[in-house]
Amino acid sequence: MFKKILIANRGEIACRVIKTARKMGIQTVAIYSDADAQALHVQMADEAVHIGPPPANESYIVIDKVMEAIRQTGAEAVHPGYGFLSENPKFAEALEAEGVAFIGPPKGAIEAMGDKITSKKIAQDAGVSTVPGVMGLIENADEAVKISREIGYPVMIKASAGGGGKGMRIAWNDEEAREGFQSSKNEAASSFGDDRIFIEKFVTQPRHIEIQVLCDGHGNGVYLGERECSIQRRNQKVIEEAPSPFLDEETRKAMGEQSLKLAHAVDYASAGTVEFIVDGDRNFYFLEMNTRLQVEHPVTELITGVDLVEQMIRVAYGEKLALSQDDIKLNGWAMESRLYAEDPYRNFLPSIGRLTRYRPPQELDVEGAVVRNDTGVYEGGEISMYYDPMIAKLCTWGHTRAEAIEGMRNALDGFEVEGIGHNLPFLSAVMDHPKFVSGDMTTAFIAEEYPEGFEGVDLGEDALRRIAASCAAMHRVAEIRRTRVSGRMDNHERHVGEDWVVTLQGHRFPVRIAADRDGSTVTFEDGDTQRVTSNWTPGDQLAHLTVDGAPLVLKVGKVSGGFRIRSRGADLKVHVRTPRQAELAELMPEKLPPDTSKMLLCPMPGLIVAINVEEGDEVQEGQALCTVEAMKMENILRAERKGIVTKVNAGPGDSLAVDEVIMEFE
């Protein structure tokens, strides 16, 4: 077996590979840019080599720099993770020339499947059904519009060398085809060093289902079931699960067998994924083959018990697969939620900064439940603007889909992240959404269910009562402590009243608290009572409570006169006041937010790529005003209404913070 391998990647996937290598007794080498000098993968590896400035095209994807790190450390093999150089045939070729093993498929398979146009032709020859589209490369925006019209809108504009949602746009008309072509081309060039673009029909209401395959260099191969990846935003997967709630055994077998045919057609050896879109009648169409480890591989590992990274290493060493298709059994259900550094309340735009608090739920593996968190960050670390915004993958397993979902709900409730915008509230909201719970979702789920963006969750009255009762009990504990600290009297509890008014999410709940040594009984105005027990103490940012025998986990912050409570996707200001305080509070005027309607604010930390208007220009609703790039994604900002530009405060090349004013209007 290899004695030392280098991981040509960063973040959570580098940490993931290091864990398996350590288990196998293999030493590891990390590489890092200036921005990652203190990164977790650097700390975990046995050795680490600096390879350049923060931008990936000056460090992580510079083949010569990675090769020099290999020579310096004497690594015998390289695991590329995903993204970066993982599907670059020139990198595989350079390793081969150096006599270093590539922990991935042969160069020929990468070339054949890494190019989406070539892979579709091979798939067609292998008898795999494909999506209608134009296989030839698109030269310019005019040709993109012409082809889009011939195929019929909507169309998908895709980077030939793309992946991870980069270089991909959906166009519904000529203008979007023209803009989408240029943005896809720019993103593809910056992310992959390859700006070739092609266009295919966008199939509406599809499900995105992929098959995991594993092949060795001796002609053996197995498929390890499927993953459902239909919960997507901007073509980027957000939640995955295995198996799919939609497939039957017959369709699963057919998709698995076709996937293996395609793998064998290109002499594939390693772990790989064949992606399909599946319509409502379970007709499936080949999308692409990813010749690497997928981000969502943990859910497959959880339902099969197969360590895919270990298998990749063994195949690269030349071993035969120790598994046959009969050995692959799907056990239980697994969920994966991707924790992104992005603000769901700002249309999921990227967020950067320092993780002032990062406390994942405790990992566990017991009979009936698994919690796993693959991460590449730590409390106090920086989230950089240079790389993908995903910072962790939270996974749960249960005997049934319902158990896996409930495990994920509880794990998300117990995940503490502060200092950056993050999508934990949105992930919690999806776990409670009726369509998701029923398994009735498509890739249009987010667009259909959150058409105006995510604005938080409005909890039902039962949930609000549980939170109100909990906050009343917590407030009482805080008041007792405050009275004790003030030293007013020895019998401090005499000064803490029993009657309170709890207000949250537009509801007003007068309550009375009867406390004893074991907890509090909270009685509402209508006679409803709730028994609250907890070991919460003031200052704790996570409260584990039991309300009428059912567990409840709340993220707790302090606001004047109460708490900021986050639970199940809701972000609530909860005020707990005496009846007289509540009476007076209702007379207070509400503070209005400042008027920014005549300004274009930068919605995220990013780099201005282009300014499309000048001072004095009249703009129309929907007109492109400027382009901002952040975390390798271009975002076109448009006019919300007709107006005249009076001032432009930024230009191409400027780096802006959130809410900086880009331009002003009359």
Image: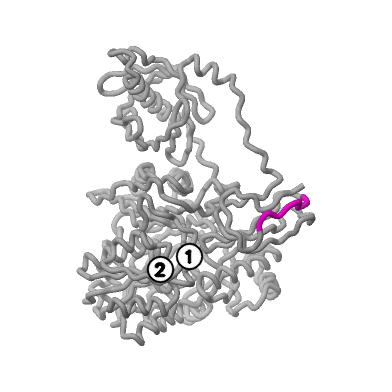
- Regarding residue 249, the answer to whether it shows in the image is no
User: Does the magenta stretch mainly form a helix, a strand or a loop?
Assistant: strand
Q: Position of residue 449 (x, y in %)?
A: 55, 47
Q: Is residue 657 above or below residue 608?
A: above
Q: Name the residue rendered at 45%, 34% in the picture.
A: 564
Q: Quadrant of residue 111?
A: bottom left
Say above or below: 386 vs 325.
Answer: above
Residue 269 visible to the viewer: yes
- For disc 2, the neighbor class at 10 Å (few under 14, some 14 to 19, many from 20) is many
Give the number of the disc on residue 513.
Answer: none
Judged from the image, the secondary structure of the residue bearing numbered disc 1 is: loop
* Residue 205 image point, x, y percent: 55, 58
- Colour scheme in use: one colour
- Please determine whether, in this image, residue 49 is positioned above or below residue 400: below
Q: Quadrant of residue 630?
A: bottom right
Q: Which mark is residue 164?
A: 1
The three-letter amino acid code for the residue at tag 1 is Gly
Label number found at residue 82: 2
For the magenta stretch, what is the residue range? 643-650
Of 188 and 159, the residue lying toward us: 188
Residues under numbered marks 1 and 2 in contact, where contact means CB atoms less than 8 Å apart: yes
Question: Label 2 amino acid?
Answer: Tyr
Q: Please report the residue visible at 43 percent of the width from the left and 81 percent of the height from the top.
A: 89
Q: Quadrant of the N terminus?
A: bottom left
Residue 376 % position (x, y): 36, 58
Q: Say which element carries label 2.
A: loop
Residue 648 forms part of the magenta stretch: yes
Cα distance, mark 1 to mark 2? 9 Å
Residue at the limit of the structure toward the bottom, as seen here: 97
Asked if residue 546 is among those painted magenta in the image, a careful observer would answer: no
Which residue lies at the image location 43% right of the left edge and 27% below the top edge?
468
When asked about the image quadrant of residue 614, the answer is bottom right
